[in-house]
Amino acid sequence: MTDVQPLRVVGVSGSLHEPSRTTALVRAILDEVAARTGAETELVEIAALGPSFAGALRRDDVAPDVERALQRIESADVLVAASPVYRASFTGLFKHLFDFVGQYELVGKPVLVAATGGGERHALILEHQLRPLFGFFQALTLPIGVYASDTDFDAYELTSPDVRRRVSQAVGRSLPLIEQAAQSRPSEYVTTW
């Protein structure tokens, strides 16, 4: 008899600081997915890992904790990938981490993209930076991304009812696609929704 394992969802916060609005947004999305599916969630924070891979040129140069994070990203059933907007794009260390992800390790993997920024004008990062990055990996970027600006937070806590509704909508509309992708996983994995 095979063990049944819950959906594994890994969130990646590209923020370079802690506390972080981006990390708070990723946590809100992970909590919503877990509440709806019973998924196991993990958070990978660039702020904690950055010093361990910033100067690495090859994957075998990264520290063991970074290698473990890369393996979690590659083996996740679903990714939540988020970055603050920095100079009209994601942070350099966010991109550098994904430079070490195997080129074919994310094929078909559902990815919910999210971002934070100083104002609403930065919301296009979802369409013009994050979707193309995961398109390169042939991942399945989910239809609704989530963007939050500085005014949607109070002391690094997501307080905006509109953004919370967007999180709920993004997760809700993604579940059929996640379920479809999960059906192509090895049989020892099942979803609980």
Image (spheres, rainbow, N blue to C red):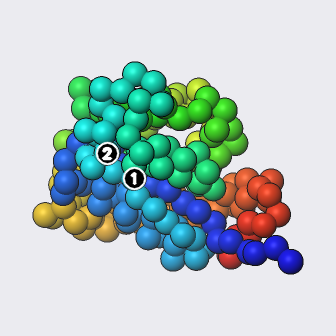
- The type of residue carrying mark 1 is Val
Task: State the image coordinates of residue 105 (x, y, percent, origin top left).
Answer: 64, 38
Location of residue 57 in the rendering, given as x and y in whole percent from the top left corner? 40, 22
**Residue closer to the observer: 92 or 48:** 48
State which quadrant residue 158 falls in.
Answer: bottom left
Q: Is residue 143 left or right of 177 when viewed as pictured?
A: left
Residue at 63 percent of width and 40 percent of height: 106
138 or 152, nearer to the observer: 138
**Identity, as a three-letter code, of the amino acid under mark 2:** Leu
Numbered disc 2: secondary structure? helix
Q: Is residue 15 visible?
A: no
Reading the image, the residue beneath label 2 is 49
For the residue carrying disc 1, how many other residues have a C-alpha within 10 Å: few (<14), some (14-19), or many (20+)? many
Query: Residue 3: where, in percent of width, then height?
Result: 76, 75
| Whole-percent x, y for residue 66 in the image | 41, 44
| Rendered residue at 30%/31% (across/down) | 54
Image side of residue 187 versus residue 147, left or right: right
Task: Answer above or below: position of 155 versus 57.
Answer: below
Give me the disc on residue 44.
1
Q: Residue at x 37, y 63 (%)?
A: 27
